[in-house]
Structure formats: C-alpha cells, structure tokens
Image (cartoon, rainbow, N blue to C red):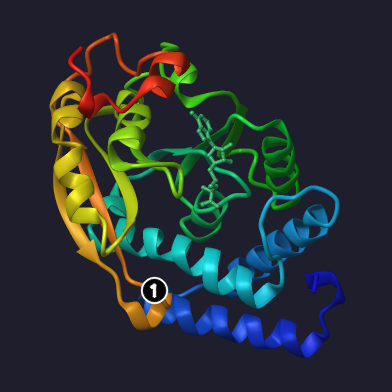
Amino acid sequence: MSLLDEPTNSFDAALQELGFRSSQLDLSLSAGQIVSLRRFLQDLSRYNEHTNLVARSDFLTLVKDHVTDSLSVASVITSTGLARQQNLKVMDIGAGAGFPGIVLAVVLEDLLLDLVDSVGKKTCFLNQVVQSLELSHRVSVHNARAEVLARQSHFRAKFDLSTARAVGSLDLISELAVPFLRVGGKLIAQKSTKQYAQEIEDSQYALSLLGAQVSGVYPLDRTILGKERVIVMIEKIKETPEQFPRSTAQIARGSLSKRKV
Ligand code: SAM
C-alpha cells in the first residue's frame, strides 16, 4: 500500500511511532521537524509510485526501517559532541532516497550537507525534497560518482563528517569517504552487529593507506531499531595520498584492502 492510500489513523500511528523512537534515541523533535519528516515521506511515497526508490513506501515501514536508522546517526552525532561544532560540514555518499542525509538535515538544523548519488532519478528526487522542505540554503545535491567528486579541489578534504548508509563494505566506503574529510574528520558507518568486527579487520590495510583509523564503535539499542546495529566511527588522522580514491574501474576490480598498491 502506498502512503497516499493510507487512512489518516495510520498516518497518526506512524507519527506516534516517530515521536516514540526519536525520544528513545534522546532526540526531541519539534512539531516543525515532525511536519517536515512527514512531508518528506509523503513526497517519497508519491515519487515511488512512478520511480522505484525504496522497496516499500508505506509510512510505518519508512519510519521503522529508514527514518529510525537515520535518527540513530543523528543521535550519535549529538551524543559524541560532534553536533556542538557550528555548521558541521557533512557529505552523505550514496544518498539514495535521502537516508540518512535528508533526515539529518531536518533534525540537526545547523548542519551543512552535501548529498551525492550517481543515479539521476535519485538526485532528481532529492532536489525536489530540498526545494519542498526549503533546505536549499544548507543542502546541496550532486549527481556524480563519489570517487570523481572527491578528486575535485572544492570537495577534497573539506568535510567534518561523512555518512554512507548501505553503500558497501567498510573498506569501500572508507575509500570513497575519507578523501572528502579534513584531518580529524569522521566517517560514520552503520553496520550489522554480526559483520562489523570482520569488516573492521578486513579494512585495516585500506585505512592505513587512506590515512585513517577506527576511533570508536557505538552499539545501538536493538529494541529501538528492531535490528542489531552498531555505528563504526572512522577518523582521518593524516592527509590521504592523491591516488585515492581510485578510478571507478579500479574500484570495480576489487577492494583496496586486498590489493597491493
Ligand atoms: N543511503 C541510501 C539508503 O540507505 O537508503 C541509499 C542506499 S542504496 C542501497 C546505495 C546508493 O548508493 C544508491 O543510490 C547508489 O546509486 C549509490 N552509490 C553507489 N556507489 C556510488 C558511488 N560510487 N558514488 C555515488 N553514489 C553511489
């Protein structure tokens, strides 16, 4: 069922769910922020009717599967003190339908966000949302490959934070994200509890090449997210050599960790 066909009471149930989950994550959303999230989900559901962006677009699924997961990123940005920095510059790689990027923009109103995705129908939707939620003064959308954008001087080493939800393994997203970060900047990676330790081990070589290291692991409450998740924080500790990220073709040939460069 599409969100647009849903009866008002299921809207209300999902809005209640949204309020409940955000308070469990220690985020108190204002009425205006809830209205913005609701508009975002309505826009997504409407767009999804003709252009596939998410598998299921009923309001409750969007709240449970995507918004809550994105709010967990906001909660770590807040609880670790990162949000105290004014105008934190954030690059969301593989932004897709706007998770976590659009949710972060709505709930953390001081962030400056760049959203990049290589698929035009996704960035077209994101541009519509940015207009509809009046976010254009602090959110920019780029239809590009992250590894190409990260080589441009305007973007390279310019960000305090990067996110990349459901884009790939830790070594892949590190290769895409770390070049965007200034030294001291952080990548927030959302990972399953089962896989994260192996992924950290597998990415050690890549991280050493990129000039980064794991700086923290934050377990998330299963009862809030409905699944086992952790956030792995990667910190850039020195400048990334110019040859990274590799070209799209080289990246497609295999993970950085497994290659001798
Ligand atoms: N982050 C969103 C989410 O969690 O719903 C989307 C996840 S989707 C599975 C992965 C997205 O990453 C896709 O929209 C894809 O187009 C994008 N993507 C993958 N590789 C990319 C790259 N190298 N540069 C830019 N976007 C990329």
Q: Residue at x 29, y 41 (%)?
A: 170
- Number of residues whose C-alpha sits closer than 10 Å to that of mark 1, classed few (under 14), some (14–19) or many (20 or more): some
Residue 10 place in picture, x, y as percent: 73, 86
Where in the figure is residue 102, as x and y percent of width and height? 57, 51
Considering only vertical position in the picture, is 224 above or below 134? below
Q: Amino acid at mark 1?
A: Lys
Q: Quadrant of residue 223?
A: bottom left
Instruction: Indicate left or right for 47 with 139 as reference.
Output: right
The x, y position of residue 207, in whole percent, is 18, 31
Residue at 82% in and 59% down: 46
Q: Nearer the viewer, residue 139 or 215?
A: 215
Q: Quadrant of the C terminus?
A: top left
Residue highlighted by disc 1: 227
For residue 78, what is the image quadrant? bottom left
The secondary element bearing badge 1 is classed as loop
Task: Work out whether residue 160 can be spotted.
Answer: no
Query: Is 69 left, or right, of 217 in this rendering?
Result: right
Q: Is 153 drawn above or below residue 40 in the view shown? A: above
Place residue 13 in its image quadrant: bottom right
